[in-house]
Image (cartoon, rainbow, N blue to C red):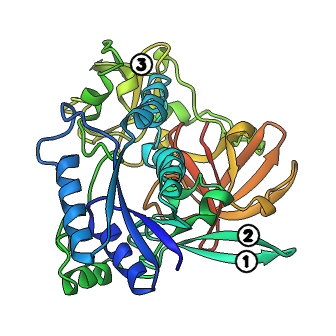
Amino acid sequence: MKKVVVGMSGGVDSSVAAYLLKQEGYEVTGLFMKNWDDSSVTLTSNCTWEDDLLFAEMVCKKLDIPLHTVDLSNPYRKRVVDYMFAEYERGRTPNPDVLCNREIKFDLFIDEALKLGADYVATGHYCRKEIKIINNKPVYRLLAGKDPNKDQSYFLCQLSQSQISRALFPVGELLKLEVRKIADEQGLATATRKDSQGICFVGKVDLPTFLQQQLQAKEGDIVEIPETYYADKETSDDVKAIAKAYKYKREDGKVLAKHRGAHFYTIGQRKGLNIGGTGKPMYVIAIDVDENIVYVGKGDNHPGLYRKGLFVASDEVHWVREDLKLAVNDTNEYLVRVRYRQPLQRATLIVKPEGIYILFEKPQRAIAPGQFAAWYDEDELIGSGVIY
């Protein structure tokens, strides 16, 4: 009998994953990870890790499977949270959930599961895995989940073939409603529990408060860039020029207000600017942490919110399907997204010695450096990289 260790989060998805695996005949063991215990930055309406553990215990008792716990809070802080601080300090917008999966759930968690004798690890992610034999060797395909509203393959865009080989995703073939129905029919305590929100394992936070643990507030100017700024800008067919983000100077616009620190903001942000009386909403269109300036544009369709392309440096490129890796000067069309839940967008990938240029069929809104771009062939995740 194959042994599977399930990452029990205290939520309905991992609970049903454990149930389904037991029904399939696996020897199932639950493993709860404690990754964060600082409640000073989380909003009071959110559950703590103690609540999550209590629900995990209730589910495992109901399913009659053992539950182990492991404290990974120190490596989580070093590998995920410290990375977040460093990226925001550089004026970039990281995705901690992607890092958490690569560094914790499918790295350290696998190590802990192997200590328990696991053949596989399982999570409640809404994605699917298939095995394809190429040249007599297994190649693991990571596919989107069946539920289009819950597909979480994007969060796994940095996983390696080795990591995927150990993973099982039991709820990937189901819709969320079906998962909750199964939990209800089996009398699982998590059946009606709300999905977690916010930063992976940390919860919903006030981001500036969270970042001020390590990043100091520093007053600076909020500068509005008018739409007329773009009127005389030359268009170019050069891929490097197309993928480049606009670089503004203070004199390109007018000072509207003050901010608490450029590194507390992200491109596309609307709330928290404290700018009134403008008629249309203001959005962050660029951040300059060296000069401590936040640039904003007025209106939902301000040109500064949109980019035709982006760039991923060669050392930030990751191929989930290593056998499909493009060589230098290769070009291919893929479907691309730059954030969770964003509909896939048609784009062309162009590989150069310095990295990959991604040119979209239609300009994309609020692309921020530090985010992950993930590219797909239909519903299969092929690769990803950090946006420069």
User: Which mark, by number, is residue 132?
Assistant: 1
Kindly check if marks 2 and 1 are in contact, taking CB atoms under 8 A apart as contact. yes
Is the C-beta separation of discs 1 and 3 under 8 Å?
Answer: no
> Label 3: how many residues lie within 10 Å, few (<14), some (14-19) or many (20+)?
many
* Residue drawn at x 61%, y 33% as measured from the top left: 232
Left or right: where 206 falls relative to 387: left
Question: Residue 110, image x and y in percent?
Answer: 52, 54
Three-letter residue code for mark 2: Val
Q: Could you classify mark 1 by the number of other residues whose Cα lies within 10 Å: few (under 14), some (14-19), or many (20 or more)?
A: few
- Residue 363, image x and y in percent? 57, 53
Regarding mark 2 in the picture, which secondary structure is present there? Answer: strand
Q: Nearer the viewer, residue 55 or 341?
A: 55
Query: Residue 290, image x and y in percent?
Result: 50, 14
Q: Nearer the viewer, mark 3 or mark 2?
A: 2
**Residue plotted at (24% across, 33% down):** 38
Name the quadrant containing residue 295.
top left
Q: Earlier in the sequence, mark 2 or mark 1?
A: 1
* Whole-number angstrom distance, CA of label 1 to CA of label 3: 50 Å
Instruction: Using a 10 Å C-alpha cutoff, classify the residue at mark 2 as few (fewer than 14 neighbours), some (14 to 19) or many (20 or more).
Output: many
User: For this view, does 42 lie left or right of residue 290?
Assistant: left
| Numbered mark located on residue 139 in the image | 2
Q: Is residue 123 above or below residue 40?
A: below
Quadrant location, the C terminus? top right
Task: Give the quadrant of residue 293.
Answer: top left
**Element under disc 1:** strand
Residue at mark 3: 293
> Mark 3: which amino acid?
Ile
